[in-house]
Each structure stands twice: as C-alpha cells, then as structure tokens.
Amino acid sequence: GPLPYATARLTKSESLQIAHQNKHEWYAKRKSRSARWETSSTQFNLYRVEICLIILGLAGSSPVRLGISFESLRQFRDDHFRELVGKTTGQVRDDLIKRLTSASQLSFAEFCTRTPSGGQYSQYDFGPANLFVSHAWDYNFLELVAAIEDFVEQNPGGGTYFLWIDIFVVNQHIPSIPDFPTWSDVFKSTLRAVGRALFVLLPWDKPIWARRSWCLFEFFVACSCRIDLDFVIPRTERDRFVQSLCANAGNTFLRVAAKIDLAKAEAKYQSDRDHINHLVRKNIKFAVLNSKVVEQVRIFFMTEAVRALRMVGLSGEQHMNVLLNVAEFQMEVGELADAENTIRAHIDESERAGDDISEARGLEMLGRILMRQGPEQYEAARQQLDRSVKIQSRILGDDDLRVAQTRNNLASVLEKLDNDEWALAMYQKCLEIYEAHEFEGKVESIANIKGNIGNILMKSEHPNTNDLERARCMFVGALVKFVQIYGRNHEKVAIARTRLARVLSMQGKCQDAFEELWKSAKIFRHNFAEDHHRVVGTFENMRMFLTNANEVYVEEDCLQPGEWRFETGDIVALQIGDRFVVAIVTSEPQVSDVLAHTTSKLCAFGCFSSDINVSTSS
C-alpha cells in the first residue's frame, strides 16, 4: 500500500519510529532466515528512503520540493539584518536557523509552514522550488542574497521564484548522511523536478565554489539531469571584474580556470568527500567534469565582459583594455569570428591613439586567434606575430618578458609551418628568459616550451644521439614542472610521460619506456572513461611499442603453430579468450624468479590484479 507519509503529515519522531520499526523487522526476518526475503528487503529499502526524505526536510508530507520565495528571502534578510551583518551562510545556519528550529527539530521550511497564522514566521512563503541555488557556506550571507537579487532583476521570468537553498529547506539537525548512494538518488530526482540551477561565484577571480566538494556534487548532478544552468556574481564582484578588465587584468580568471581541479575539492567531512569523488570517478571522471565547469564559467564571464563593453564613461585606454580582454574570452570559448572582429577594433583604436604597445598586444592576440582558425591562416598569423615582436622589441628590449611571450607564440606558428630551425631558436631564447623569470609564475610556460623543444628535436626521421638526449632532458624537465604544478595524476603529466616514453624507446631504453607508458595509461584511466581517445591511444601505443622494440604482441587470431621463433629477451603477450598471458623468454636458470619479478612490476603498474598465476615452461 501507499507509504504513510504519502497520505498523512507525520512529525520527525513519528517518521523515525516507522523507519526504525521497519529496520528492526528486517533484522528479525534476516536472523530467522525467513522465506519472505523480498518483503523484508523492500521494507529495509523503504527505511533508507525514509531517512533520506527526513534529511531533505520532506518527511511528514508528500515529497514536494519546497523552496523559499524570493520575496520571503528578502524579508528574512530585513527582519534579521543586524544578526546577519558580517556572517557567513554557515554561521547563519548555526546561529539563527538552528536556534529558531531547535525546539521543533524541523527544517526551517517545515517550521514556518507549521507556525500558527499570525505568528512571526507564518508570513514566510514556501512553495514548490523552481530554482536551485548552489553556494558555499563560506560565502558572506548578505552577498549571497545580493547575488540572487541581481539574478532575479536580470531574469524576471513569468512568476515567483521559489529558491531551494539548503539552510532553509533541509533539516539542519541531522548531523550526517546515513546512506549516500540512496540519498544522492533522492537528491537527483529533487533537482530534476526543480528544473533549473543557479551557481553563485564568490569571489569572481577565485570562487570558493570551485573548491567545495558539495558544490562540485551539485554541478555534477545538474549536468547529469541536463537542467538549465545559470551563473551569477553580486554587483560588488561585477564591479571588481569590470575594473580588472579596464586595468588589463581580466585574464586573471582564465589563468585560475586553467588550474581548476575538482579532484582537490574539500568537504567538512572526509566521508562526504570520498563518496562524492567515488561517484564522479564512476560516472564521468574528474578531467571531463573540470572541462565542463571551466567551459560554463568561461561562457558566463565572456557574457559579463561583453556587457562591460556597453558601459559608458570608460576612458580610451580602459575601453581598449576591455576590447582586448573580451577578445581573449571569446577566443577561449571558441567564438573565433567574434574574437577577430573585437581585436581588430582594439587595433584600430590603438592606432588612432598612437599607442604602439597596445597595438602590439592587439597584433599578438590577432595572431593567436588566426592560428586557431586552422592551417589556412597560419601564414597570416605569422605575419601579425612578427609585427608584434618587432614593435615590442624596439620599445621594451629583446629580453623583456612580454617580448618573450609573443616570441613563444611566433615559434608555435613557425613550428606548424614546418620552419623548425627558426622555431627551435626562438623557443630556446624564450626558455632562457622564462627561466630567469620563473619566480613570476612562468613554471607552466617553461614546461610547455621544454616539451615543444623536445618535439622538434625528435622530428627528423633519423635523429642523432645528441638530439635524442637533449629531447629526453627536455621531456624530463617538462614532466617535473607539470608534477610540481598539478600533482602526479593530471592529464598533462600523462602526456609528458607519453612523450618521454617515445624518446626512451628511440634510445633503446625499452624497459624504461614501457614503464612510462604504463604510468601514463594509469593516469589517463584515472581521469577518463575506458573508451576515451587518450586511454585507447595509449594502449595502442603500448602494442606498437612492443612490436617496434623487437618484442612480440600477438592475439589469438594471429597465432599459427610453428610460425613464431622467439629469442632470449623477447616478451610475448597473448590474449587467449578472456585471459591475458605475458611470457618472458629467458635463458636464466631461475626462470620462476624472473617471472615473479616481472609480474610483480606489472601489478605495481596497475595492469593486473594481484591474483596472477606464475608458472614456468621449458
């Protein structure tokens, strides 16, 4: 029959009593090995759902997704303004929400709806939520409300906004989540029913939101449900953002966004973080989620930057800086035609103002945009970047860091045009300047240039020994820098290891190369799904490597009796049905020791489980 809370309003204690009654009945049936296992299992699952509904503040009523009306949120702020000044959302929850609901032990929404008519809190309006608000509890509460106000003003809609804000609609007296998988399913259905999510970013240039596991979970669920996503910053933060655009610091966020790593997000309870990280790795992988977050946030800030262009009262220099930064945002989100139009407007204004440095910066940006438009624009990009280098060198000097940045882009397009000798000389010059300025945050640029130099040194069909050793040193240097920046499990670290494996194999260091490929494969599998091109490509490289290293990789349909002749040192990898067998051909008398050592290394690489049968054959 229907669950009790579907037809009657129950208090929290009544709901818990029913839940525990079902749980104890399940235990009793399990202990007596009752034949009615399916019934007891169902009742236990109802217990899990009941607990989750209580946590969501829905126990005691039909599972409606309540939200506080926008007008009531503002009224709450006005009624308690003195208590709210200077407090974070977490402090408001602890000092105000929990105090008001301590006697009833209900969510604030339930507390208000049960307050008798005429009471102070009966005037607050709650209804089915139509806007989910994602925020961090470290946010200043008044700034959070101000951000929501700005969003509502910009998106008036056709009716009242009912806001799903956790501190108002979730019961704050339940300390932890007893069953995360079931709770996440209930939360997902809640968010799907709400249908729209608003993510509040504070501060604009380094949002706390991107460093909180629960915010990550909310974004993950919103993406999974394919609901509408919006971002907002309060007016004070928007003013700071516009000031940064005018002062030519707008790309601060682009640098921060490039380093967003949600795998490093934090939570108050380690168990919550572990559950969320497991869910992400199982369903989407962190690298994919990172890219989704960066893409959505970049689009939002590009829109804000374009809006800043329409502001009146900007000086000529401020307007040129805004144009430059808007073009960069447009380029980063892939709107290359708009980016080209914007940067050409910047160049025209710079020429009219006689500002050579501003013009040179515009020419550099134009070169980068043209380079992204494809091979047919490479020569045009080279011309613009060459003009920019000449102007900046004349004014700033050859060893200036800004000249090196432009020269690095010029080297990149020269490499694409197969002018490797000139590109190599420019990269080398850039590297010298960057290493002298490493303390100014050029670590990643150094890693990228070292990788580019290594690639050029390996381009020839028959690179000499010196070039291979130089390339190996460059790839090792790049790997060290990427680990320093991102840690050991980042996609860029895996790419650096793949490059290093290639040069090691060309040097004849096959075992070292194979180990680097395995480490790379582990990182890619950590970040991406099994069918991702990075994962598939790395394993294909391993197959090719084994063949090219005069070692053998064969599959079941390739085997023909008597066809193969093996020599000492060969590795034979056989896939027989659903088994994968690795054989090492050796003349060592202690064959079992050789096999045990090799299989233990393969286990360490994560290629196989530890349950491997080691055997010998004459």
Image (tube, grey):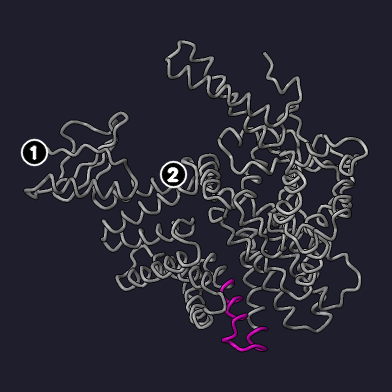
Q: Amino acid at mark 1?
A: Ser
Q: Main secondary structure of the magenta part?
A: helix
Query: Residue placed farthest to the right in the image?
Result: 118
Evaluate if marks 1 and 2 touch, with contact meaning CB atoms under 8 Å apart.
Answer: no
Q: Is residue 539 shown in magenta?
A: no
Who's the residue at 61% across and 57% down the image?
211
Question: Residue 279 at x, y = what percent?
Answer: 54, 41
Q: Is 444 left, or right, of 370 in this rendering?
A: left
1 or 2: tag closer to the N-terminus:
2
**Is 485 displayed left or right of 260 in the figure?**
left
The residue lying toward the viewer, choosing from 366 and 479, is 479
* Farthest residue, direction front: 103
Can residue 223 be seen at all in this image of the molecule? no
Residue 202 visible in the displayed image: yes
Q: According to the image, label 2 marks what residue? A: 536
Q: Residue at x 83, y 73 (%)?
A: 319
Disc number at residue 118?
A: none
Depicted 206 relative to depicted 358: above or below:
above
| Residue 42 image position (x, y, % from top left) | 56, 19
In the rendered view, tell whether residue 599 sits above or below residue 473. Answer: above
Image position of 344 with respect to 139: above or below: below
Label 1 crowd bin: few (<14), some (14–19), many (20+), radius 10 Å: few
Question: Is 396 inside the magenta-drawn segment?
Answer: yes
Q: CA distance from mark 1 to mark 2?
A: 35 Å
Which residue is drawn at the image coordinates 15% and 38% (left, top)?
615
Q: Residues within 10 Å of mark 2 (few under 14, many from 20)?
A: some
Label 1 secondary element:
loop
Residue named by callout 1: 618
Q: Which residues are magenta?
A: 391-409
